[in-house]
């Protein structure tokens, strides 16, 4: 008899689809663009520190072509680079966003919400880096540059907005027909596109405020509030609540900023004169506010064990410990053997070879031991569940009495999965399916969804 | 298809040709004017002043828009003038006028007597020089009218008599360029390009060497330009730092204390700083603000319109000074250094009469002139002092009666903006 429990996740399919390739190609291209912008910021910082590099950039900037413009931007921006604290804030924020984007895609490369979030996070990493953005403002943009910047903003903006709409289950809310939901989302989509196209020059402060201070958190708050109040799933209820409370400060601060600053505290043009000044206040307000969102997401994933995070953490702990142990052992053995062999030979190759063999031989046994230790220490429940199921599987080969088997199955499932309710149906000899029994925890209302399917 | 050796050779050759390093041809950038990295400025100069190239090189005259108009003017007439003038300038250019022998001035004036200047004596524009003009032979019109040939030839052969870009149009804050393609058959020699607005003081001599000669690469030319900029700007950088840190500037005749509208260093004759220092000020209502206006002509202007350049180009090709630049506006009194008393522009129907400004006191010898512009009420309308200046500086005083934050700018120089916070 085999026992099958409905799988919790549906993306266990293997094989690469065309749209997977298309998405990752697009994301790679988008990320390269973002990294180029961030790279200009790094270049400006380097030029602010190194006089020789600064001069080289100015010399290159006197040429023609794309690189000359990039060099001149970095050279000119180097005069406005802020102190180490602000540089750390800028690039720390960008790093957090990029790292979380990579992490989300590693966890769930095919999940729609993860993909949208990753796009939004990659975009935000560039948009909210003041040091990098200041390089773009040093020269008035060419039409192509404006188009590229507007496109990048639109993609990041829509990615973020739709990620917040679809988090955590990847399905839009409310659960209306497709056209109705599309119509509902249309104003936010249009507003996102219009605002994202205006994030430059004089309009930068105002549009950043409106987009990231009002539109994005407003959409997210509305969607998560809906899930919070209407979702039948307790887990989704909690996840929505977490993100709701993470987005609400952003909305409040954004609304207050729009009220206080109006069109923005500074402009990068004044009556048609190009002035490379940045809306510093806007950036400093929204960097921490928008850092809350990925932090809340990460906390939610950890807290509610989303997207097999347990497995990731488990693997990280185990392989990290094994790597550190074997690395230290390798060094220690090399040093020890070199001392042992030095009277015999000056050549350290023997010590290295022996160390390498020793480490290779120790890898698997050490991995098993560390995995067992971690499971027993940090994942006791899962460890016990595995053991319980292994024992039950062994007894299956010996015990053929159906009644005792079903009773033991009930015990095993209750011990390992603690369901609120479980029912069993058995296939009769004539092919029909007959209900055998239902077990319910005290206080749990009857439901038609819980089932354990048996096949014979 | 198999890649054969000759294909590779062709590809490598094409790549080598396109690099344009020390080889002939390629592009060389010559800077026309410059705004310094650390402060807004103008330089009546080209950088570098000398460049060696080979036939077929494309010269890109890259103008930084600082507010000053420029031309790129060459040809055989310019070369003849350059043969005499350039050595004089190289020897005497940094010498105070009073120490220059009279015969030097005589030689200079003789060599430049036939120069067509873009600005006439009355500050009107000479259309011959202000508009493009390309002559294979002869001389440009003496009547100030535009030439017949205003379309730039494909190449500069070195044999054209007059090769003039006209005033390079303003194309936005990113600056503009004027390109000169040297012909492949241009004779080796030295060709002078100067600015018809500012004269041979602003020039680049292009030495054309025979094909295949060793010439500096584009990067080397750029480094040379940067080095010349650094040398020229060093005194100005000291002045700027002195003004921003200690709020004072020491000139030959006196020491001035801020705030400043423009900055000047007596050791620099071809450049000035175009900045309001400090950029932000806080004063009380009706407290007098006295700017030391030095260097180039500047204006103190509030509620400024979208930036407009000093010259405008009409549809028929005529180039003229922008009439909105010079005069005062919004009821501001007019400063005239040649007259004892100021003139007050009559108020329009919609505006209240400006406060009558006190007549300027007599300025003693060496004392900077002073002018009190009275009180501005902080209204929404455009208000401008007009373009003004003084020697060694003009002390321009204004009071603002209404509390608020006011942004102001110089109409001529784009990055020259400031902010005044007026408290009650």
Image (cartoon, rainbow, N blue to C red):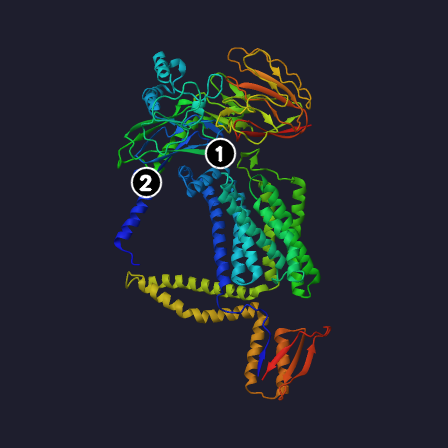
- Mark toward the viewer: 2 or 1: 1
| Quadrant the N terminus of chain A occupies | bottom right
3D distance between C-alphas at marks 2 and 1: 30 Å
| Quadrant the C terminus of chain A occupies | bottom right
Q: Is residue A286 above or below residue A449?
A: above
Left or right, B415 with reference to B189: right
Q: Is residue B56 above or below residue A147?
A: above
Q: Tell me where residue A78 appears, x and y as whole percent.
A: 47, 39
Instruction: Give me the disc on residue B21.
Output: 2
Callout 2 secondary element:
loop
Which is nearer the eye, B118 or B245? B118
Instruction: Give me the disc on residue A163.
Output: none
Callout 1 secondary element:
loop
Q: Residue at x 57, y 46 (%)?
A: A197
Q: Is residue A109 above or below residue B336?
A: below
Q: Is residue B155 above or below residue A357?
A: above
- Residue matched to label 1: B171
Which is nearer the eye, A154 or B419? A154
The residue carrying pointer 2 sits among few (fewer than 14), some (14 to 19) or many (20 or more) residues within 10 Å by Cα, namely some
The residue carrying pointer 1 sits among few (fewer than 14), some (14 to 19) or many (20 or more) residues within 10 Å by Cα, namely few
Left or right, A281 with reference to A42: right
Q: Tell me where residue B357 appears, x and y as whole percent.
A: 64, 16
Residue A176 occupies quadrant: bottom right
Q: Does the rendering let one see residue B245?
A: no
């Amino acid at each position: 008899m085999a026992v099958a429990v409905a799988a919790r996740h549906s993306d266990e399919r293997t094989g690469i689809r065309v749209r997977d390739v298309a998405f990752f190609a697009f994301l790679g291209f988008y990320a390269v663009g973002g990294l180029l912008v961030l790279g200009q910021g790094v270049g400006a910082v380097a030029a602010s520190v190194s006089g020789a590099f600064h001069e080289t950039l100015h010399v290159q900037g006197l040429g023609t072509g794309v690189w000359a413009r990039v060099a001149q931007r970095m050279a000119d921006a180097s005069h406005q680079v802020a102190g180490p604290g602000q540089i750390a804030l800028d690039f720390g924020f960008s790093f957090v966003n990029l790292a979380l984007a990579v992490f989300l895609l590693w966890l769930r490369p095919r999940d729609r919400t993860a993909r949208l979030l990753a796009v939004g996070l990659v975009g935000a990493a560039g948009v909210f880096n003041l040091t990098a953005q200041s390089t773009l403002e040093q020269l008035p943009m060419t039409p192509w540059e404006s188009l590229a910047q507007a496109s990048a903003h639109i993609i990041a903006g829509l990615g973020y907005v739709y990620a917040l709409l679809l988090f955590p289950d990847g399905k839009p809310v409310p659960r209306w027909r497709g056209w109705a939901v599309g119509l509902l989302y249309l104003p936010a989509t249009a507003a996102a596109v219009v605002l994202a196209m205006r994030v430059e020059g004089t309009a930068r402060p105002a549009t950043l405020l409106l987009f990231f201070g009002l539109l994005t958190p407003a959409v997210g708050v509305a969607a998560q509030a809906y899930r919070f109040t209407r979702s039948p799933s307790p887990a989704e209820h909690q996840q929505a609540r977490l993100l709701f409370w993470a987005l609400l400060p952003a909305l409040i601060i954004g609304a207050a900023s729009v009220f206080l600053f109006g069109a923005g505290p500074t402009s990068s043009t004044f009556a048609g004169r190009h002035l490379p000044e940045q809306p510093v206040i806007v950036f400093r307000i929204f960097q921490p506010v928008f850092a809350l969102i990925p932090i809340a997401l990460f906390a939610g994933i950890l807290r509610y064990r989303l997207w097999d995070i347990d497995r990731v953490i488990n693997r990280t702990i185990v392989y990290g410990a094994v790597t550190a142990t074997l690395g230290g052992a390798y060094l220690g053995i090399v040093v020890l053997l070199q001392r042992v062999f030095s009277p015999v030979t000056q050549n350290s190759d023997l010590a290295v070879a022996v160390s390498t063999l020793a480490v290779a031989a120790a890898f698997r046994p050490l991995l098993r031991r560390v995995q067992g230790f971690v499971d027993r220490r940090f994942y006791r429940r899962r460890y016990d569940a595995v053991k319980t199921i292994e024992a039950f599987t062994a007894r299956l080969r010996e015990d053929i009495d159906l009644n005792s088997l079903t009773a033991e199955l009930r015990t095993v499932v209750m011990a390992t999965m603690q369901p609120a309710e479980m029912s069993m149906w058995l296939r009769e000899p004539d092919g029909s399916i007959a209900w055998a029994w239902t077990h319910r925890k005290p206080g749990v209302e009857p439901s038609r969804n819980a089932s354990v399917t048996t096949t014979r | 298809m198999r890649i054969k050796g000759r294909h590779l050779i062709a590809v490598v050759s094409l790549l080598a040709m396109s690099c344009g390093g020390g080889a002939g041809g390629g592009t060389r950038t010559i800077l026309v004017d410059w705004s310094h990295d650390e402060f807004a400025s103008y330089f009546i100069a080209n950088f570098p002043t000398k460049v060696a190239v080979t036939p077929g090189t494309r010269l890109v005259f890259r103008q930084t828009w600082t507010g000053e108009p420029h031309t790129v003017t060459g040809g055989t007439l310019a070369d003849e003038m350059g043969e005499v003038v350039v050595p004089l300038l190289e020897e005497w250019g940094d010498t105070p006028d009073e120490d220059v022998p009279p015969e030097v001035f005589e030689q200079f004036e003789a060599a430049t007597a036939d120069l067509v200047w873009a600005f006439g004596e009355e500050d009107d524009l000479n259309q011959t020089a202000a508009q493009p003009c390309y002559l294979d032979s002869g001389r440009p019109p003496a009547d100030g009218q535009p030439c017949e040939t205003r379309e730039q030839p494909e190449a500069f052969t070195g044999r054209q008599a007059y090769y003039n870009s006209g005033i390079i149009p303003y194309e936005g804050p990113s600056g503009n360029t004027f390109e000169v393609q040297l012909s492949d058959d241009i004779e080796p020699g030295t060709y002078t390009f100067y600015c018809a607005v500012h004269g041979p003081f602003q020039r680049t001599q292009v030495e054309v060497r025979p094909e295949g000669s060793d010439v500096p690469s584009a990067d080397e030319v750029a480094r040379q330009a940067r080095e010349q900029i650094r040398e020229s700007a060093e005194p100005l950088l000291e002045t700027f730092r002195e003004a921003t840190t200690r709020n004072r500037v020491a000139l030959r005749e006196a020491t001035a204390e801020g705030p400043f509208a423009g900055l000047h260093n007596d050791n620099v004759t071809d450049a000035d700083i175009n900045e309001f220092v400090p950029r932000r000020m806080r004063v009380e209502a009706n407290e007098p603000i006295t700017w030391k206006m030095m260097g180039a002509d500047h204006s103190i202007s509030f509620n400024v319109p979208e930036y407009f350049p000093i010259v405008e180009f009409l549809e028929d090709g005529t180039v003229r000074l922008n009439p909105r630049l010079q005069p005062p506006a919004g009821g501001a009194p007019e400063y005239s250094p040649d007259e004892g008393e100021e003139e007050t522009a009559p108020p329009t129907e919609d505006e209240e009469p400006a406060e009558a400004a006190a007549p300027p006191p007599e300025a003693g010898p060496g004392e900077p002139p002073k002018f009190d512009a009275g009180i501005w009420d902080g209204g929404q309308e455009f208000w401008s002092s007009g373009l003004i200046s003084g020697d060694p500086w003009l002390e321009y005083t204004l009071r603002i009666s209404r509390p608020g934050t006011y942004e102001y700018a110089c109409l001529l120089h784009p990055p020259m903006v400031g902010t005044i916070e007026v408290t009650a």
